[in-house]
Image (spheres, rainbow, N blue to C red):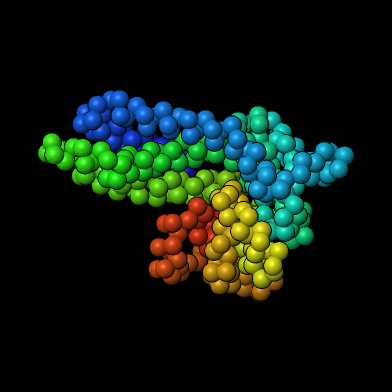
Amino acid sequence: MGLQVKMWLLVALMFGILYGVITGIGSYFGIGNVGIYLVLALIFVGFQYLIGPSIVSMLMRVRWVSENEEPELHQMVKELAERSNIPKPKVGISQISIPNAFAFGRTIRDGRVCITEGIRKLLNKDELKAVLGHEISHLRHRDMIIITLLSVIPLMLYWLSWRLLWGGMFYRRREEGGYAALIGLVAFLLYFLTNLLVLYASRIREYYADQGSVKIGNSPHYLASALYKLVYGSAQIRRSARGKEELRRVQGVRAFFLNDIARAQNEIQELKEVDRDLSGTIDQSELWELRHKKIKIRGTERMMELFTTHPNMLKRIKRLASLA
């Protein structure tokens, strides 16, 4: 099934769950109680929409650069944006040593693409271009807005379950023979389920952006090689004092990164079977070989993937091999 279709089906499912919960709660407690949660959700979305970019910029220590300062970087972004038929995003450099890149913004016209200081020392020009294509594809797909909207649904369900189970509403209804505790428990289970669905949506958007980078002209093996280097670089950075401090600093916004920096050490072991000549890169022949090879992922890794914002890296590179 196409990644875009999966994303929209997931949006429909999430809002279907929300509609069912609101209908059930509304019929039991009255629309006034449900209205409070709707208002709170709208306030949360609005607040996140307004200050989100500023928070990301601050945590990532972004310095916006002009064309005079970084002509080559600006030229890459401009070319890729034109191929994607979107306005050229603002360009920044994150002053952290973790090798990575990210994109964010309120709208497609407010798009911002950033690379870190660490990534420039790690990737060659073609690999960096493939990475920038991935980030620009996030802007083109507008998937950040979708994730923001979806993330409100688990939050609403958590508020509802907390209010029903521990906020006093259950105790007021217990003497009336009501089912507040049961409804609260169902809301909590749906909170857990919808949270997993949001993580699933986040993983889909990474696959979708990989595909988008290839569609605008970047070779799959350059993006695969860049991802491999980012995994290796992320694992290496944990060994330094500065790296550990930076990892703590960006913990809350690491979903914006190209890979999950917290899982890098485990992913290196899996990716060794792709880098057959141990060159530290994935060339075209190695990616082509992976296309016809059945990959093996440990059960624990499959389970861990359910709780992460990024796909398992071996699966992700295998998908890139299918695009080669």
Of residues 178 and 55, the one nearer the viewer is 178
Q: Is residue 273 visible?
A: no
Location of residue 142 (image quadrant): top right
- Label count reads 0
In-image side of 305 versus 241 (left or right): left
Q: Is residue 222 above or below residue 149?
A: below
Q: Residue at x 72, y 45 (%)?
A: 62
Residue 122 lies, in percent from the top left, at 74, 61
In-image side of 54 versus 12 (left or right): right
Q: Quadrant of the N terminus?
A: top left
In-image side of 18 versus 245 (left or right): left
In-image side of 35 versus 103 (left or right): left
Location of residue 153 (image quadrant): top left
Residue 240 lies, in percent from the top left, at 69, 69
Name the residue furthest right. 68
Name the residue furthest bottom. 277
Of residues 69 and 134, the one nearer the viewer is 69
Q: Residue at x 44, y 56 (%)?
A: 307
Q: Residue at x 37, y 32 (%)?
A: 37
Of residues 76 and 68, the one nearer the viewer is 68
Residue 248 lies, in percent from the top left, at 61, 59
